[in-house]
Amino acid sequence: MKNRLLGFGIVGLLMISCKTPLNVANIHTEKNIYITDQLKENEAMNAAIQPYKQELEGKMNTVISHTNVELTKAGDNSNLGNLLADYTFEGADEWAKKNNRPPVDAAVINIGGIRTIIPKGDIQTKQIYEVMPFENEIVIVKMSGKGMEGLFDYYLKTQKNNPVSHLIIETENGKLSQKLINGKAIDYNKTYYIATSDYLALGGDNMLFFGKGELISTGIKMRDLFLEKFQQNPEISAPNDVRLIFKNKKSEE
């Protein structure tokens, strides 16, 4: 047992060294320890873990919703991206109402945070974990009307399909031809409240424009919200409206 624990300690040390450069001169053990498939399983440990494993697998395999179409992240207006952006908007707006905060005006999420698709058919709990494996929190960013120009300029510059809700952004020939918030042009005398993830609010994906706003924490985990929304909607109605329009879009290198 002493040798085995020492072996695990060496493995841990090597794993740490992948993150932090270390100069290791020598490592001495009393006996070489090899990890192979011939090692006997600890039956007592397996027996103790089995009930929890079965419970977890049962929860992960539970059907929580259904979709008649594949929910994909492909394209400038992906149905899965737009659906999750709408859920982000709804969750943040519901939180704002419960906490006597101003209503949310729009939502922005990043396509890179959506890790996979949801195939046509039944939707299980584990699929939401696969779609959103991160522990990101929903935040609301309080922004001035002038500050909102930075959001639209970001899409003009990147022409990236980061999903939005309650926003219409159209670019053509290097210019913004349409920029609408809830169907209206920017009001420079208005204060806007934009729901997003803490990752983006802190400048992730080069969304530096959020840095000019004031962050309001909701304490809501995005994945928890998405799970709740799918459970509330036994049959998913995927959005098919057009929100991002990049005319003469530059080809990606």
Image (tube, helix red, strand yellow):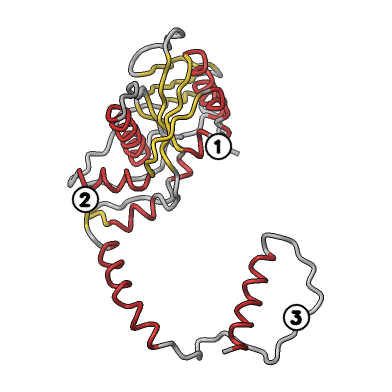
Task: Give the alpha-carbon distance from disc 2 to disc 1, as whole Å.
Answer: 31 Å
Residue 36: mark: none
Helix, strand or loop status at disc 1: helix
Q: Which residue is mark 2?
A: 65
* Kind of residue at badge 3: Ile
* Kind of residue at badge 1: Asp
Q: Which residue is mark 3?
A: 27
Q: Position of residue 105 (x, y in %)?
A: 36, 22
Residue at the image position 27 percent from the left and 30 percent from the top = 98
Q: Position of residue 13 (x, y in %)?
A: 67, 71
Query: How crowded is the residue under tag 2: few (<14 C-alpha within 10 Å), some, or many (20+)?
Result: some
Residue 144 horizontal side relative to residue 30, left or right: left
Q: Which residue is mark 1?
A: 205
Comparing labels 1 and 3, the label whose residue is closer to the camera: 3
Q: Is residue 212 above or below residue 95?
A: above
Helix, strand or loop status at disc 2: strand
In this rendered view, identify the residue nearer to me: 113 or 6: 6
Q: Is residue 161 above or below residue 2?
A: above
* Kind of residue at badge 2: Ser
**Which one is earlier in the sequence, the residue at label 3 or at label 2?**
3
Say which quarter of the image contains residue 250.
top right
Residue sticking out furthest to the left: 234
**Which one is earlier in the sequence, the residue at label 2 or at label 1?**
2
Say which quarter of the image contains residue 20.
bottom right
